[in-house]
Amino acid sequence: MKWKTAKVSSLCDLKNGKAYNADDWATEGLPIIRIQNLNNSSKGFNYWSGTLDKQIHVRPKDLLLAWSGTPGTSFGAHIWNGPEGVLNQHIFRIDILYGNIEKRWFQFCLNQQLNSLIHQAHGGVGLKHVTKGAVHALEIRLPPLAEQKRIAAILDAADALRAKRREALAQLDALLQSTFLSLFGDPVSNPMRWEDSSLLGTLAEIVSGVAKGRKLGDKNVRIFPYLAVANVQDKYLKFDVVKSIEATDEEIAKYRLIKDDLLLTEGGDPDKLGRGSLWHDGLPECIHQNHIFRVRITSAKIDPIYLNWLIGSQRGKKYFLRSAKQTTGIASINMTQLRAFPMLIPPLPLQQKFAAIVGSIERQKTAQRGHLAELDALFAALQHRAFGGEL
């Protein structure tokens, strides 16, 4: 049977969320569903207690589309499996108009066209945005409802295998977090009474990076790779897209990265303050952007892996949230605030024990990521066949 073709605009309505800033947050009320919650509905929420608008209302099993984000992670369609809440900006709620559309099939169908969405998207490298018009204009082949359900069931079974790999990775992350707390205690209350009188700036050299658009005049320059904010994630670095910049020999000498440099982003979503990762010579040579701080340890009392985890802990998040400059939905820290970060200094052998555990678990995570990449490739091929009518 030949499948009909229809535009997305004829099959559903797209309702966009609203922007919330820190002034809108409450300690109770409805959870604000943000892009980061779509892949992990148990991730921490901010709350909103204002008057409920039907357009931003989200219920369990609603179909949501993150129209802004990083391809391969949150960008795309998700069936919401968390609590009732309200919708943040950069997410559409998809209201299907007809009963002859299987929701799970429609989700798979939209995500199968993710490459088309990305092609029409705008935004910086890594972060992409797609318009409502671009989504509406997508044309999809519409099989009978029974065939939609059959395809959805097959893809569900394949997707469940990927979900198990992701869950295994999440469990390894949880194991690391519990290990950190077991060895060092709550870093906010410091129940083990570790030394807490030192500031980060007395134990490390902290510099900002090279600025784009600066005037170089007639100085001799080289084209040099540099890390931007999108490359620096929470305890890992992304090398899928690495930009280059003109830099002088003096700048290269000043900003060149060496092993165990800690890279921290200066701002972004408030909950991402303190996000950073260690440099492990992922490229032969590299410098960093001015929106990234480089922390180079100068004290023999601090292990770099421990430092990365301490700054990314609740101790770091609470400190940076108190200190940060905040505008609508965005928070940033400066050099002075970072240098004044209040350290906790357990005995070095304990820090090194934790670092060894992190190394072991990270090797397991690398293997799991490899298996997940294989499953992702197989799933993509299966989707291509399914929506081409070949399954």
Image (cartoon, grey):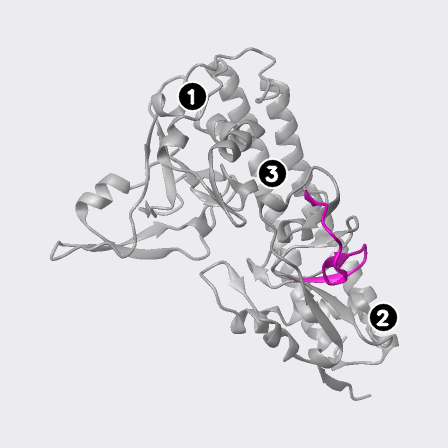
Circle 2: residue type: Lys
* Residue annotated with mark 1: 302
Magenta residues?
46-65
Give the percent coordinates (x, y) of residue 40. Answer: 69, 47
Give the percent coordinates (x, y) of residue 312. Answer: 53, 33
* Residue annotated with mark 2: 149
Residue at position x 38%, y 46% in the image: 291
**Residue 196 to residue 303: above or below:** above
Circle 3: residue type: Gln
Dot 1: element: loop
Q: Earlier in the sequence, mark 1 or mark 3?
A: 1
Quadrant location of residue 10? bottom right
* CB under 8 Å between discs 3 and 2: no
Task: Give the total number of marks visible in the rendering.
Answer: 3
Q: Is residue 79 visible?
A: no
* Residue annotated with mark 3: 364
Residue at position x 35%, y 20% in the image: 299
Residue 53 within the magenta-colored segment of the rendering: yes
Q: Say few, some or many: other residues with alpha carbon within 10 Å of mark 1 (under 14 / 14 to 19 / 20 or more).
A: many
Give the percent coordinates (x, y) of residue 21. Answer: 58, 48
- Mark 1 vs mark 3: in front: 1
Q: Say few, some or many: other residues with alpha carbon within 10 Å of mark 2 (under 14 / 14 to 19 / 20 or more).
A: some
Residue 202 within the magenta-colored segment of the rendering: no
**In the visual, does 277 lie left or right of 364?**
left
Q: Say few, some or many: other residues with alpha carbon within 10 Å of mark 3 (under 14 / 14 to 19 / 20 or more).
A: some
Which mark is on residue 7?
A: none
* CB under 8 Å between discs 1 and 3: no
Residue at position x 73%, y 67% in the image: 94
Residue farthest along the left direction in this orientation = 218
